[in-house]
Image (cartoon, rainbow, N blue to C red):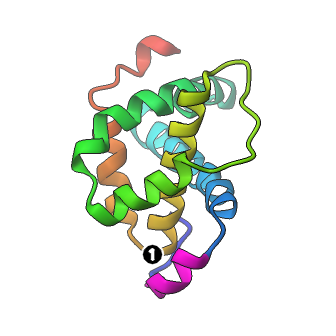
């Protein structure tokens, strides 16, 4: 991951705007997906990798991923997730329901929070639980 060890002050992280965390979380999640695909698929064609990545980063799939990890979240992680999920003033895309989009925003917020906390291993752990045994090669 791009983030070196950065054990930020939790109070500062809690003061960050939720929209800013969700914005950063979108990039963090994309990076985790890309790292996962490059390392685990053996695919090197950027077009194929982009097609694969799209199946992970769309709101509907992120919402399903949340269902697979909710029970594993700590109280603190659940609170951060809820902050992101309950964000106000967002436009929901046509490709997802409002609930799916809010859940995906919560997931992205959580990943940004963990990233800024220097919790890269926790990000990888949650990602692995969110996408267990994904058959990647059949999607190419």
Range drawn in magenta: 7-15
Numbered disc total: 1
Tell me the residue at 71%/30% (across/down): 92
Asked if residue 65 is positioned above or below residue 120 in the image, the reply reads above
Locate residue 81, reporting x and y percent.
Answer: 45, 53
Tell me the residue at 55%/52% (across/down): 84
Tell me the residue at 23%/49% (across/down): 72
Is 110 magenta? The answer is no
Locate residue 138, reporting x and y percent.
Answer: 43, 11
Residue 8 seen in the figure: no
The foreground one among 106 and 88 is 88
Callout 1: SS: loop
The foreground one among 37 and 23 is 23
Within 10 Å of the Cα at label 1, are there few (<14), some (14-19), or many (20+) other Cα atoms?
Answer: some
Q: Is residue 76 left or right of residue 95?
A: left
Where is residue 134, by image quadrant? Answer: top left
The foreground one among 45 and 19 is 19
What's the magenta bit mostly, secondary-structure-wise? helix
Asked if residue 86 is positioned above or below residue 103 in the image, the reply reads below
Where is residue 53, by image quadrant? Answer: top right
Tell me the residue at 45%/60% (across/down): 80
Locate residue 82, reporting x and y percent.
Answer: 46, 52
Locate residue 10, reporting x and y percent.
Answer: 45, 82
Q: Is residue 117 left or right of residue 112?
A: left
Name the residue tied to disc 1: 117
Furthest toward the top, the residue is: 138
Residue 22 seen in the figure: yes
């Amino acid at each position: 991951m791009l983030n070196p060890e950065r054990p930020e002050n939790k109070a500062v992280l809690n003061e960050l705007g939720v929209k800013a965390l969700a914005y950063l979380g979108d990039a963090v999640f994309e990076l985790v997906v890309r790292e996962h695909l490059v390392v685990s698929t053996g695919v090197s064609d950027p077009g194929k990798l982009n097609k694969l990545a799209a199946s992970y980063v769309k709101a509907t799939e992120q919402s399903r991923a949340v269902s697979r990890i909710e029970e594993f979240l700590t109280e603190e992680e659940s609170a951060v997730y809820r902050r992101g999920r309950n964000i106000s003033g967002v436009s929901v895309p046509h490709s997802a329901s409002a609930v799916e989009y809010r859940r995906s925003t919560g997931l992205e917020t959580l990943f940004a929070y963990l990233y800024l906390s220097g919790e890269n291993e926790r990000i990888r752990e949650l990602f692995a639980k969110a996408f267990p045994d994904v058959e990647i090669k059949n999607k190419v």
